[in-house]
Image: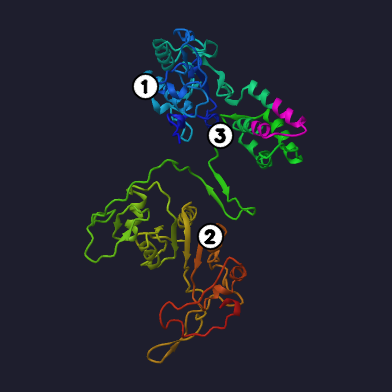
Amino acid sequence: MTIPLKGAQDTLPFIGTMTSIQLEEEDMAYMESEDLQSAFNLFAAPDQWLPYFADSKKVDGPAFGLASGTMVRPALAVIPMGWHSAVGLVQEAVRTLVFERAQVPKSLSIEKGKPLPQSDTKAIVYLDNFDEIHVVKKLSEDFTKEGCEMSEYHKRFVEVCDQDGLPRNAGKQLIHAYAGGLQGGLLDGKKGVLRAAPDKLQNFLKISFALLAGKKWSEFHLRHWAGKAAFIAAFRRMLFSNMFQIFPLIEQSRCGDVLPTRDCLDEIVCVGVLSVIAQANLRAPVSEEISCTDASPTGGATAVAKKFKISYLQVPDAQEDDGRCAWCEEPHEPGQVTYPCSRKCGLRACSPMCAFTHAEGNCTRKELDAPTFGERFAGQNFPLTQAVALEGIAIQPPLDIKIASYAWDYFSESGKRKLDLMENDCSLAATHWAPECKSFTAARGRPITLPSGRTIPGPKALRSRERPWGLPNLSKDGLQGFKEALEAGRIVSLEHPWNSLLWWTPEAEELFGDDRVCTACYSSCCFWGLAYQVDLPHHKR
């Protein structure tokens, strides 16, 4: 078993990566490029490797300056093309020239599988090629230097090549060029476009026409076309959507030539026709909102993202709790109930609000999103929010006009704006609504018996089963938050007493008929709720 030498093979850039370069309207891009002549023959292999690179046939010695009659096996002293480790070694050698000898910063390197460098200068090393892409403003000084002066990194690379006697292809050299070849592509830095080079495109069209004219297809022909088509599609990713049936046919062709099918003929025609307009617009703006669905035929789940995450973000290790509140830094008392950080950083807080403030403020993992719970009309002690926070789930500040620290008047304009802001939080995953029930209770209008036995008139009834929304000036917003959360796809619950007239409203009737909604009846304490017996329709129980 032979183990390939990896070298720097994994650093090979891919032309599709370059299509992610972004140019503003006032930006332009120019190139610098050098091409080594016959790079695989420029670097010598160690003498110990010669037996492994030798030919099986012997030749007479005079061919190598030896005496006649001496039979020897020729061996390659350079890197053999086609050897499984050749690409990795040559890539390693040229990267050494660029990043170590010429001292081009590695932070500028474009590499497959890594984010694009943030700098306006980007370096591309692909075997025998060293390319630079520079982004400049149209009115900058660099714009006036077209074709006349090498970049500093370009000069250093040329000096290193000259020192080592490494020949370069003068015909492929580019100096401050606003258009030029790049890995089989053509970069137009003035128009802000990257597309397939004309010779590559013509070659692909010829292959496509040949397949369309063929009466049978071999595995080689199909794989050759699919590889070329994938290269063209790198400049316009949507072209991949026209390539489905070709791959099963390739598998069939492994057993022998196959006959063309209508589906594959259609795919070849579509990709061929669209290839002539396949290009990447480097000035295309990035949408601030990304929508996605799952892969099921019916699109069972959807999501919308309005901000980017750092794909290579490393999650910090959990900290060790030092016995102090994560936010106010007060020491925890023995036996005190504490609240874990919702982002699992390892610290604990002395109250739900300290846990919330810590997670949003000084938490080492605050860049990580955490599903959040929000309670509406929470009550002065907000017990449900406390219980959720104890489980290490992220919370919003509980909303209720009775909480002094977070006074919130839903009926004021500022209160409505605050509620809208919290309801639109992209991390909000679940909400609980418990709107005030005193105007909805069916007990209003009944007389009240005092401990002395004397009876007095009770509060006037404001609503009835016939008119559950009651007088015109009463609020009709009791179910609105629940319905909006339901439509937003969140987990949502609504709490109200059994005998509440809220359940008789048309909006509640509509919710009872919604398959997404289920109902439950329970007592909030052992004996509460036994004073009145209310006959509700069966489906409301």
Which label lies toward us, 1 or 2? Answer: 1
- In the image, taking residue 406 as reference, residue 469 lies left or right, namely right
* Count of number-bearing discs: 3
Q: Main secondary structure of the magenta part?
A: helix
The label shown at residue 485 is 2
Q: Amino acid at mark 3?
A: Pro
- Answer with the quarter of the image where residue 195 lies: top right
Residue 343 appears at what percent x and percent y? Answer: 37, 53
What residue is disc 1 on?
100
Residue 346 appears at what percent x and percent y? Answer: 31, 54
Can residue 537 be seen here? The reply is no
The magenta stretch spans residue 297? no
Q: Quadrant of the C terminus?
A: bottom right
Q: Which residues are magenta?
A: 206-224
Residue 115 appears at what percent x and percent y? Answer: 46, 34
- From what the image shows, is residue 18 above or below residue 465? above
Mark 1 element type: helix
- The answer for how far apart the CA atoms under marks 1 and 2 are is 57 Å
- In the image, taking residue 342 as reference, residue 306 lies left or right, namely right
- The answer for how far apart the CA atoms under marks 3 and 2 are is 32 Å
Q: Amino acid at mark 1?
A: Glu
What residue is disc 3 on?
285
- The answer to whether marks 1 and 3 mark residues whose Cβ atoms lie closer than 8 Å is no
- The answer for how far apart the CA atoms under marks 1 and 3 are is 36 Å
